[in-house]
């Protein structure tokens, strides 16, 4: 049996007509940037997240970067980010001229450990960026209370967590702002690059929108030296077609994850922990195994696709050599980078396929 790490085919088959209708609607309108589709999607997505405002952006990295910029985070500032995340979280900080400061995750949940945040706070710290990594919400009560105590902004990185819940509320509405990515492989994916910033602060939303539209508040009037990062009409229309299906697709991921968690019983493998307050959306189902590379090769040889999130921690990347962090200084991120293995996870995976993966893992010696 061949089981890819990810496949869009079952979803694309189901949504084929709706996606084509969305294409026709935009194409027939001959209107491609800043229009009705974007406006309607922003409203629908803000409502979905339980937030006041949504601003469409070109991608998730820009949504995070523009949020930080709009909050006034910049040169000389420090921003707390988890040591285990996709590099875009840290790059958003770097792009506004600030410095990312890494805080280790809890190895069981892969999420930033709030009990370690305070030790990294100093007079330069401006914000905390919790990442709801792999689709599970961070401990937002603890993070918000630290932010309040030190007067820091909170910008949630929700790129992997569309619809994930913490204490009954969807992520994206806890902090001052949140960045979402609609990269095709994300739980809610466009047919290209796209993203959005979400916030309960209308004024901040206006500033993020202006910053992503050449710093313009109205046509040919520029109040900021802005970027060009807007959600185009075609992607907004595709996202509008997909949004009503998101909960169902997340539910399907939870079903697959539950099968993995109850079915995998190889003592060499550790399955991920879900916290009581969380309803995760399983962007990634990551197991840990000391013999990760051997397990990966064994699964790949059986036709099972896998991935590693992430094989090189950010502090060991060439581009972040300037931070001067040495191997050994962030041991949990380093351990995750050598032991984490992501299993196939996508809408439309059959029970038979999931069971094939489980059996293969349990037979690994
Ligand atoms: C995908 C991702 C991003 C960046 O989103 P893009 O749309 O690819 O720019 C940011 N943070 C995390 C955690 C991600 O997984």
Image (cartoon, rainbow, N blue to C red):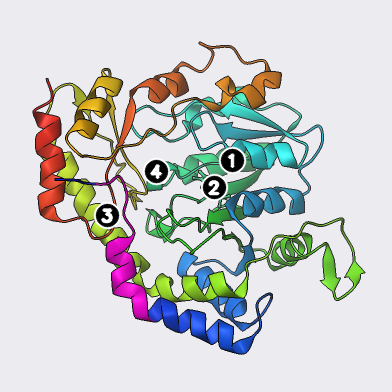
Of callouts 3 and 1, the N-terminal one: 1
**Is label 2 within 8 A of ligand 1 (CB to nearest ligand atom)?**
yes
Q: Residues within 10 Å of mark 3 (few under 14, many from 20)?
A: many
Q: Position of residue 179 (x, y in %)?
A: 58, 54
**Location of residue 284 by image quarter:** top left
**Is label 1 within 8 A of ligand 1 (CB to nearest ligand atom)?**
yes
Nearest the eye: 154 or 179? 179
Q: For this view, does 183 lie left or right of residue 204?
A: left
Residue for badge 2: 157
Residue in the picture at 43% in, 21% down? 332
Q: Which mark is residue 253?
A: 3
Please tell me whether residue 322 belongs to the stretch shown in magenta.
Answer: no
Q: Quadrant of the N terminus?
A: top left
Mark 3 residue element = helix
Mark 2 residue element = strand
Q: Mark 2 and mark 3: span between their CA atoms?
A: 20 Å
Please say if the residues under marks 2 and 4 sit with CB atoms less than 8 Å apart: no
Of callouts 2 and 1, the N-terminal one: 1
Of callouts 1 and 4, the N-terminal one: 1
Q: Mark 3 and mark 1: span between their CA atoms?
A: 24 Å
Q: Position of residue 98 (x, y in %)?
A: 75, 35
Q: Position of residue 356 (x, y in %)?
A: 11, 43
Of callouts 2 and 4, the N-terminal one: 4
Q: Which mark is residue 89?
A: 1
Magenta residues, start to end: 4-17
Q: For this view, does 223 lie left or right of residue 163?
A: right
Q: Mark 1 and mark 4: span between their CA atoms?
A: 14 Å
Secondary structure that dominates the magenta span: helix
Of callouts 2 and 3, the N-terminal one: 2
Q: Mark 2 and mark 1: span between their CA atoms?
A: 7 Å
């Amino acid at each position: 049996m061949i089981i890819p790490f990810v496949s869009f085919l079952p979803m694309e088959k189901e949504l084929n007509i709706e996606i084509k209708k969305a294409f026709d609607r935009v194409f027939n309108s001959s209107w491609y940037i800043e229009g009705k589709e974007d406006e309607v999607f922003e409203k629908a997505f803000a409502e979905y997240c339980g937030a006041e405002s949504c601003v469409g952006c070109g991608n998730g990295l820009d949504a995070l970067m523009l949020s930080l910029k709009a909050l006034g985070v910049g040169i000389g500032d420090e921003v707390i980010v988890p040591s285990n995340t996709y590099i875009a979280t840290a790059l958003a900080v770097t792009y506004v001229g600030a410095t990312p400061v890494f805080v280790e995750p809890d190895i069981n949940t892969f999420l930033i450990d709030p009990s370690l945040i305070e030790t990294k706070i100093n007079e330069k710290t401006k914000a905390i960026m919790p990442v709801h990594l792999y689709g599970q919400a961070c401990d937002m009560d603890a993070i918000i209370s630290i932010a309040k105590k030190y007067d820091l902004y909170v910008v949630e990185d929700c790129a992997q967590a569309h619809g994930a819940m913490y204490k009954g509320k969807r992520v994206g509405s806890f902090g001052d702002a949140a960045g979402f990515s609609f990269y095709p492989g994300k739980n809610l994916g466009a047919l290209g690059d796209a993203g959005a910033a979400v916030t309960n602060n209308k004024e901040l939303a206006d500033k993020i929108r202006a910053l992503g539209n050449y710093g313009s508040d109205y046509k040919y009037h520029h109040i900021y030296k802005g970027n060009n990062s807007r959600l185009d009409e075609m992607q907004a229309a595709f996202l509008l077609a997909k949004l009503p299906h998101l909960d169902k697709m997340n539910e399907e991921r939870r079903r697959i994850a539950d099968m993995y968690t109850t079915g995998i019983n190889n003592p060499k493998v550790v399955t991920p922990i879900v916290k009581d307050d969380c309803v995760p959306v399983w962007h990634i189902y990551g197991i840990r195994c000391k013999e990760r590379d051997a397990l990966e090769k064994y699964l790949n040889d059986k036709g099972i696709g896998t991935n590693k999130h992430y094989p090189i921690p950010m502090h060991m990347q060439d581009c972040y050599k300037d931070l001067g962090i040495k191997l050994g200084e962030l041991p949990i991120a380093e351990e995750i980078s050598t032991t984490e293995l992501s299993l196939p996870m996508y809408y439309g995976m059959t029970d038979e396929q999931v069971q094939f993966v489980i059996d293969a893992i349990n037979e690994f010696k």
